[in-house]
Image (spheres, helix red, strand yellow):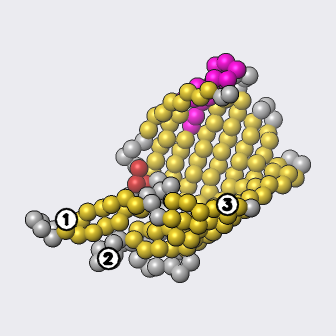
Amino acid sequence: GFVYSSMDIEPTFYRQYAVSPQPTAIYQARHSRINQLGGTLAKDFYSFVLKAEAVYTNGRHFYVSNPNDVNGVVPQNTLDWAVGLDFTLPADTRFNAQIFQRDFFDYDPDLISDKHESGYSLLLNHRINDKLEAEVTWISSFNRTDWLFRPRLSWDVERNWRLAVGVDVFKGPPLGFFGRFADRDRVYSEVRYSF
């Protein structure tokens, strides 16, 4: 379990209007103070591991679709939870499936998000040999056609060095969690030294 208080790592863009020289919307990124209370658990059941997590967040602000709202955001308390299963498969292969949800308390009808935002993720990981590992992740929403597809290849170059390459493909509606990045698919590489 944990209790946490900090500035939100994710900025919220507050809106204000300027009327001169011409009407303009001005957005300012702010990091609100949030308080979180949560817990995690994991339990093995012979051939699989059950994992679960829940986090209650107070103080976070979310965007609203109402152009007449004073600053374009409203405070909302949320409960985020996830439940997943980890399976060890033959030939150095691992499979993970999970469902997750964000529930809004005192839901504001102008929120862009639904009152209950639900989704699922699937991960398949396979160790090809002592130095090479392949992984593919799929994350999708139950509320809309919004998804992320992420294949990745990792190479243990030497004892403490790892090189990885991957692709992120985003699809969905413009206001979706992944759809907002639909025109910004990316290829990335990573070099990691562990000590």
According to the picture, the residue beneath numbered tag 1 turns out to be 24
Q: Nearer the viewer, mark 3 or mark 1?
A: 1
According to the picture, the residue beneath numbered tag 3 turns out to be 82
Q: Nearer the viewer, mark 3 or mark 2?
A: 2
| Label 3 vs 1, first from the N-terminus | 1
Mark 2 lies on a secondary structure that is loop
**Residue 160 counted in the magenta span:** yes
Above-or-below relation of 31 to 192 = below
What residue is shown at x 63% (from left), y 69% (from top)?
A: 56
Residue 159 position within the rendered picture, expressed as x and y whole percent measured from the top left: 70, 20
According to the picture, the residue beneath numbered tag 2 turns out to be 70
Question: Marks 3 and 2: CB-CB under 8 Å?
Answer: no
| The residue positioned farthest toward the top in the image shown | 158
How many C-alpha atoms fall within 10 Å of the one at disc 3: few (<14), some, or many (≥20)?
Answer: some
Query: Would residue 37 be visible to someone looking at this image?
Result: yes
Amino acid type of disc 2?
A: Val
- What range of the chain is rendered magenta? 151-165
Which disc is residue 191 wearing? none
